[in-house]
Image (cartoon, helix red, strand yellow):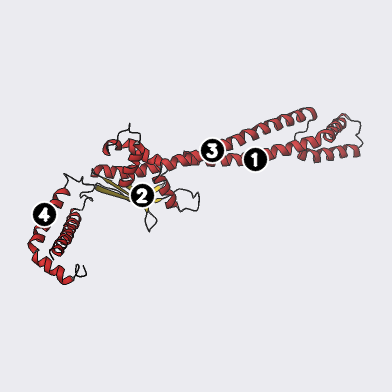
Amino acid sequence: MDNFFNNQRILNLVWKRKFHFVIIGLIAVVLSAIFSGPAFITPMFKSTARVYPTNIWTLSDESETEQMLEVLNSNDLKFRMFDTFSLDEVYKVSKDDPKYFTYMLDFYNTNVTSSKTKYETAEIKVMDNDPQRASDMCDSIIAFYNNKVGEMHRAKEKEMLVISQKALDKKYAELSEIEKELKSIRTESGIIDFEQQISELTRGYMNALASGRGSSADTKTIQKLYNNFASKGTEAALAGRRFKRTAEVIDSLTNVYEAHLAEYEKDITYSHVVEYPFPADKKSYPVRWMIVAFSTLSALFLSLLVFLVLDYQKE
């Protein structure tokens, strides 16, 4: 057994059985060429696209490209691809099969991949027996990605619109109540703008008293208004300030609402395509020469082992 794998023994055996090895090698070449042909292995064509993420926001510690891959590899997008391209017919999986999604996802994940390159692009690869369908699937994945991110973006903005609108409605209701209060005060007391009127009223009242017209009708009117300011002035001043502050808050909330509305109505893409897919004019699988070479070498190696065993048994 020590000389079973002796180099000289192997060389002698190869030379002795050279015609056998030639015949076995030729048979292996012919058979592997036949069985690697389209009659036994369906040729597959590859389409590739490379895209950069754009107009998206970071949600975690992941990079924008990694977040893009999360969407590209999401089941929502895959299920949409199933329906759009009738992949159940392509992969020959019945929709009535209880393991339909398991089989479909297995086939899809084998033939469709998305990965990050060293240049931070997302590379999409699609393998299919129809080169045009492979290219169309690549295009659709990009389009569905844009739609999916757009839906996520609009859903978030809609949520903020609802919150902003509720806040606006609340402040408008407060403003309406303050306005009613101010209207009542103005009707009852004649106080229109406390801050501006008080200085003029005080000056007019003091001048009337100084001029000795304390009993005149004008002075009595001023006296009445002055008394109203004394009793209702603080209330009017506070209401006026509340009205101003509430109006300022409404202005601020309106700006926020309009900003979210602009984002909600924005129609943009969320990917920048740097390499567009196209229908391949040459199959990517199977690589027949590799199959033939591997099969032939395997057959020759196995033959060598068999001949060595036979030769050893004779001894």
Residue type pointed to by label 3: Glu
Q: In this rendering, which labeled residue sits more in front, label 3 or label 1?
A: 3
- Of the two numbered discs 4 and 1 on the same chain, state the one appearing first in sequence: 4
Among the two numbered marks 4 and 2 on one chain, the one whose residue lies closer to the N terminus: 4
Residue at image mark 1: 249
Q: Is residue 242 left or right of residue 253?
A: right
Who's the residue at 15% across and 69% down the image?
A: 9
Q: Residue at x 24, y 43 (%)?
A: 132
Viewer-closest of 254 and 51: 51
The residue pinned by badge 4 equals 27
Check the picture and name the quadrant holding the C terminus: bottom left
Mark nearer the viewer, 4 or 1: 4
| CA separation in Å, label 4 and label 2 | 40 Å
Mark 4 belongs to which amino acid?
Ile
Check disc 3 and report its element: helix, strand or loop.
Answer: helix
- Evaluate if marks 3 and 2 touch, with contact meaning CB atoms under 8 Å apart: no
| Residue 302 on image: x %, y % | 18, 58
Q: Which residue does the numbered mark 3 point to in the structure image?
A: 159
In the displayed orientation, state which residue is furthest to the bottom. Answer: 8
Q: Secondary structure at mark 2?
A: strand
Q: Amino acid at mark 2?
A: Ser
